[in-house]
Image: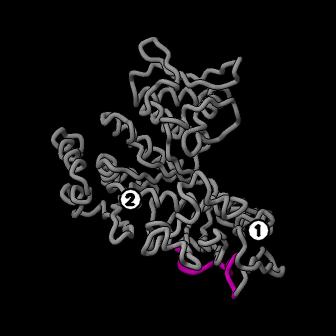
Amino acid sequence: MLRGFAARGFKSLHDVRIELPRFSVFFGPNAVGKSNLLDALQVLSRLASERTIGDALHAPVRSYPAEVFTFPPGGLQGLLQRPSAEFELEARIETGPAPSSRSNGRASRPSRRHFRYAVTIRIEPATGALSVQDEYLCEFPQNWRQPRGRPRIERDGDHLVVRRRGQGHPVHEPLGLNHTQLSNRRYSGELFTEYDLARAELSSWRSYYLDPRDAMRWPMPPMEVDDIGVSGEMLAPFLYGLQQRHREAFLQFQRVVRSVVPAIGGVNVDLDARRGTLDIQIEQAGTLYSSRVISEGTLRVLALCAIAVGPTPAPLIAYEEPENGVHPARLELVAGLLAGLAARRRSQVLITTHPPLFASTALRLARQGDLEVGLFNVSIEAGASRIERFDVAGPLFDDRELKEALATRDEVQLFEAMLRRGWLDG
């Protein structure tokens, strides 16, 4: 679980620090930095596991490598004229349950462990050369006050000190390498338990930017996958795997789909034996429709339901604008599905959104005490994103404040219309 996150020099995240609960909703108008936050999380996740920094910054990250660095005055042209630029990402993570060795019948380690991981990446814009300029990994107690022992990775002068468990001499790695030490698989196993735990947590985060217009309609063969893919491109093989190997989970998926879209009578994944490709088929009023022709909104709902019922959900799920293409009457159910993942403690969920319905749903959940909820307003000032958390438990959070935080006129009108209809009561 991600307890805290900080970014400096990353796109519009000039200097941002946030504390994160189990369910977080980030709302605000276009072009304020909501997507940049998800990109930063994805980059940090990939830096922990990809072979090189260049690999970590390539697709599905939505920028050229140079474009993830904060632009100076003059934009990209101004950046290219500079000798170097840097961004720093930092996470406070809770991992677990951790493997524990036992002595005299008692566990020698707690079931959950807490780490702070930070990394600074430099680019030479003229050549595109990327390098690690700082890296830090250290275990902390649950209160995060003092480090627990010496850092496993830290900078010392012009090199990084990489420590193992026990009394062995640390390894000294030079600064300026094109990969992080956390992604270095040589540092694994019994002497590097902390590395394995942090790497496993960070690399298992999932960010979704669904593409129902194109990627989700690609013909795909059966394959063993544990996720629907960043763009939803693996939805068909994922559902086919559920249908063949996790029948109860697939039946649950069908029930959830019908609860969100009652007009759908059933969902199946058909294997074309001649072409060797999969086709998602939905049944409506006795007629089968292929995923090649069903609406973008329906594909989005199928993807969301697949995430919600998957047998091995990711510890952190970041989902961009789940309302896109979904009928307004179904948004409450979609919000409930995402909140349910967090409420059942299956995943930590981060949502970016425009419509106030998701913000209102989060507010209601927080006031009911059913879920640890964070509601964040994202705005921009002089090109720098600001992320401010509301006190959802306090009396100051009223309808007027929520409306003012939503910057565009259409969104305010939508909010007022929902109030008149009683959609936001409670």
Residue at position x 41%, y 61% in the image: 33
Residue at position x 62%, y 53% in the image: 204
Q: Nearer the viewer, residue 260 or 237?
A: 237
Q: Is residue 360 left or right of residue 77?
A: left
Q: Using the rendered image of the protein, determine whether residue 6 is visible from the camera's viewpoint.
A: no
Please name the amino acid that badge 1 sits on: Phe
Asked if residue 117 is positioned above or below residue 417 in the image, the reply reads below
User: Is most of the magenta stretch helix, strand or loop?
Assistant: loop
Colour logic:
one colour
Residue under circle 1? 192
Q: Is residue 276 magenta?
A: no
Label 1: few (<14), some (14–19) or many (≥20) C-alpha neighbours in 10 Å: some
Residue under circle 2? 374
Q: Nearer the viewer, residue 331 or 368?
A: 331
Q: Is residue 166 left or right of residue 256?
A: right
Asked if residue 179 is positioned above or below residue 305 in the image, the reply reads below
**Where on the picture, by quarter, is residue 26?**
bottom left
- Residue farthest to the top, as pictured: 286
Point out the stretch of residues depicted in magenta.
143-157
User: Where residue 336 sits in the image (x, y, percent)?
Assistant: 39, 42
Q: Could you give the CA–CA distance between mark 1 and mark 2, rounded to whole angstroms?
A: 34 Å
Q: Nearer the viewer, residue 359 or 228?
A: 228
Label 2: few (<14), some (14–19) or many (≥20) C-alpha neighbours in 10 Å: many
- Residue farthest to the left, as pictured: 420
